[in-house]
Image: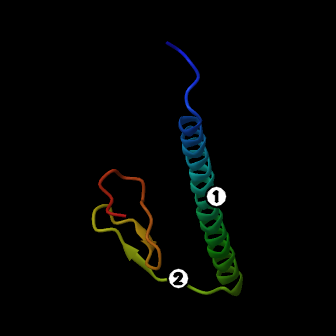
């Protein structure tokens, strides 16, 4: 009843397991590269802002239409209210 499976079935099982294994490894590598790139872009943006502040440059601001809080025009961020469009 529970005899040994044929050699062909064992080879197919090994191939399926290897394909799944390497597929997960590839997805994890791509995800790590994407996260690393995002972290690098955030770091560069932060350094650029620090340099701009050190040079004394002025940044344009725009008023939020809902609460009136001023946010940077170059990259608006949420002011903290639930109905804020940013």
User: 44 above or below 27?
Assistant: below
Q: Residue at x 42, y 59 (%)?
A: 79
**12 left or right of 77?**
right
Give residue 77's position: percent from left, percent from top: 45, 65
Label 2 packing within 10 angstroms: few (<14), some (14-19), many (20+): few
Residue 59 is tagged as 2
Quick one: 56 or 20, which is closer to the camera? 20
Quadrant of the snapshot with the C terminus: bottom left
Q: Please say if 60 is above or below 6.
A: below
Q: Residue at x 65, y 83 (%)?
A: 52
Q: Position of residue 73 (x, y in %)?
A: 43, 78
Depth check, front residue: 42 or 63: 42
Q: CA distance from mark 1 to mark 2?
A: 38 Å
Pointer 1: residues within 10 angstroms few (<14), some, or many (20+)? Answer: few
Q: Earlier in the sequence, mark 1 or mark 2?
A: 1
Left or right position of 13 against 80: right
Q: Is residue 45 left or right of residue 86?
A: right
Label placed on residue 29: 1
Type of colouring: rainbow
């Amino acid at each position: 009843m529970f005899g040994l499976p044929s050699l062909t079935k064992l080879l197919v099982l090994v191939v399926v397991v290897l394909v799944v294994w390497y597929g997960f490894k590839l997805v994890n590598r791509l995800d790590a590269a994407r996260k690393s790139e995002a972290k690098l872009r955030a770091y560069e943006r932060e350094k650029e802002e620090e340099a701009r502040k050190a040079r004394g440059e002025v940044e344009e601001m725009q008023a939020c239409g809902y609460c009136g809080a001023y946010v940077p025009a170059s990259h608006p961020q949420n002011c903290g209210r639930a109905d804020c469009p940013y």
